Amino acid sequence: QVQLVESGGGLVQPGGSLRLSCAASGSIFSINAWTWYRQAPGKEREWVARITTDATTNFADSVKGRFTVSRDNAKNTVYLQMNSLKPEDTAVYYCNAYGYLGGSILKNYWGQGTQVTVSS
């Protein structure tokens, strides 16, 4: 059984920072890519950032230059550092792990989500 557990969300003022973490546990052979998504109230889930095995990163235009993503392969953990936060960053943030988790077939696993609220 594979679990992804997220942490680090909360309430922050505009211009502030937060760091989200997502740790995978269980039967994990390799995680090819970690992806962060977010979903604001009344909106569809959107892609935010991705980091691959070789540490290549990509970001949505809306967060480029403000967010960074990193991974610790030894800990099967991914981090999303969010700086210069704006009210429009308010959403539930989800992590996704794609790789050989729980078996010999490539699969996606999702975290439970963590709330980020940017407000004064």
Image (cartoon, rainbow, N blue to C red):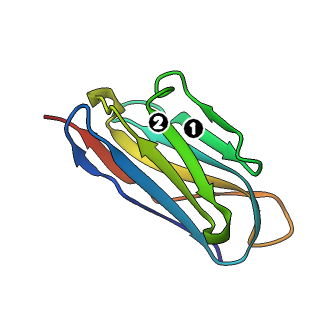
The answer to whether residue 38 shows anywhere in this view is yes
Q: Calculate the distance from the C-alpha at mark 2 to the C-alpha at mark 1.
A: 8 Å
Q: Which mark is residue 49?
A: 1
Tell me if label 2 and label 1 are in contact, CB under 8 Å: yes
* Camera sees residue 113: no
User: Residue type at mark 1?
Assistant: Ala
**Left or right: 110 in relation to 84:** right
Q: Residue at x 22, y 32 (%)?
A: 14
Q: Is residue 53 left or right of residue 73?
A: right
Q: Is residue 22 above or below residue 1?
A: above
Image quadrant holding the C terminus, namely top left
Task: Please name the residue shown 19% across and 38% down the image.
Answer: 13
Q: Quadrant of residue 116?
A: top left
What is the crowding at mark 2: few (fewer than 14 residues within 10 Å), some, or many (at least 20)?
many
Locate residue 113 relative to residue 116 in the image: left or right: right
**Secondary structure beneath disc 2?**
strand
Q: Give percent across and percent down for residue 118.
A: 25, 37
Give the farthest residue toward the top: 61
Asked if residue 22 is positioned above or below residue 43 in the image, the reply reads: below
Circle 1 SS class: strand
Which residue does the image show at 36% across and 39% down from the upper left?
91
Give the residue displayed 56% in from the left and 35% down from the top: 47
Residue 92, percent from left and from top = 38, 45
Relative to 79, residue 91 above or below: above
The residue labelled by disc 2 is 67
